[in-house]
């Protein structure tokens, strides 16, 4: 949750606690009691959605890091094959054109090139190995292709889950605000003659404002003095 959502969440908790402290003031089946109970359910939802949002954010960040590592590994594979193919082109004309490494780091282009390299290098595997490529270089290439595909999927899943959790938080916040708005009228009507309880309610149902930014250290908030006349 962002700061504004967190402040709303804190207000909901205070209002729920107010309701629990004054449960005897409202009949068991009254609208007020039902609204307080409903707000408790909303708070539980918010807690669950906030946990999902944090988990999804972590998944997306991990996917981004893993994706970068997988991208670098696949590019290393392609460059090694390209380097060897250029040497082999002395005896096998045309290999330079078959094994061209993409200039940019577009993941889809790297994946497409990786698959093409694998298919084109398979018939020439013996020659590549003769040039001191590892005996399992094609297996390594396949593994690195799969790793990049998996990292892309993981990052995408994290992003989707994060968006879904954020939307669920927005919905719960809206329902919570509507609930507190309804309770505001009920509590003020119920406790109209009890100033102490009304003050307690006002404090509980108040949403804190975002803190103001502090002035720059050593800086003055006053306007500069006018320039002297000449």
Image (cartoon, grey):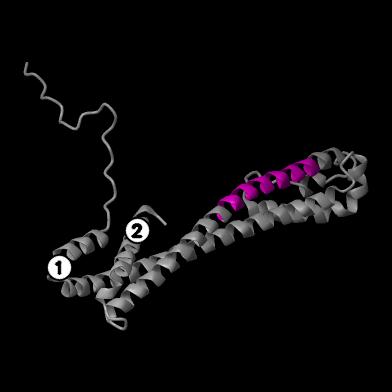
| Residue occupying image coordinates x 90% and y 41% | 91
Q: Horizontally, is 23 left or right of 96 in the view?
A: left
| Pointer 1 or 2: first along the chain | 2
CA–CA distance in space, label 1 to label 2: 25 Å
Q: Position of residue 199 (x, y in %)?
A: 18, 61
Q: Horizontally, is 15 left or right of 200 in the view?
A: right
Q: Position of residue 111 (x, y in %)?
A: 70, 54
Quarter that holds the C terminus? top left
* Residue nearest the observer in this picture, 24 or 119: 24
Dominant SS of magenta comes to: helix
The residue beneath circle 1 is 194
Q: Inspect the magenta stretch and tell me whether residue 176 lies in it.
A: no
Residue found at the very far front of the displayed protein: 24
Q: Position of residue 3 (x, y in %)?
A: 36, 53
Q: Which residues are magenta?
A: 60-82
Q: Position of residue 226 (x, y in %)?
A: 10, 24
Residue found at the very far top of the displayed protein: 230
| Residue occupying image coordinates x 82% and y 54% | 120
Say if 195 sits above or below 112 in the image. Answer: below
Say if 108 sits above or below 131 in the image. Answer: below
Q: Secondary structure at mark 2?
A: helix
Residue neighbourhood size for the residue with mark 1, other residues' Cα within 10 Å, grouped as few (<14), some (14–19), many (≥20)? few
The residue beneath circle 2 is 10
Quarter that holds the N terminus? bottom left
Image depth: mark 1 or mark 2 in front: 1
């Amino acid at each position: 949750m962002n700061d504004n959502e967190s402040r709303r969440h804190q207000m909901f908790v205070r209002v729920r606690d107010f309701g629990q402290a004054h449960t005897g003031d409202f009949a068991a089946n009254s609208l007020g009691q039902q609204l307080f109970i409903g707000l408790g359910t909303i708070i539980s939802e918010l807690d669950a959605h906030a946990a999902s949002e944090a988990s999804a954010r972590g998944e997306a960040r991990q996917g981004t890091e893993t994706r970068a590592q997988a991208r670098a590994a696949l590019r290393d594979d392609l460059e090694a094959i390209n380097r060897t193919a250029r040497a082999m082109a002395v005896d096998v004309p045309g290999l330079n054109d078959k094994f061209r490494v993409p200039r940019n780091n577009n993941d889809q282009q790297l994946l497409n090139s990786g698959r093409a390299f694998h298919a084109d290098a398979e018939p020439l595997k013996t020659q590549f190995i003769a040039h001191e490529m590892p005996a399992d270089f094609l297996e390594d290439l396949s593994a690195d292709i799969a790793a990049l595909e998996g990292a892309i999927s993981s990052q995408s899943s994290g992003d989707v889950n994060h968006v879904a959790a954020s939307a669920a938080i927005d919905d719960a916040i809206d329902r919570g605000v509507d609930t507190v708005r309804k309770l505001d009228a009920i509590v003020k009507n119920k406790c109209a003659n009890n100033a102490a309880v009304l003050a307690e309610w006002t404090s509980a149902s108040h949403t804190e404002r975002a803190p103001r930014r502090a002035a720059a250290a050593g800086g003055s908030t006053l306007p500069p003095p006018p320039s002297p006349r000449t």
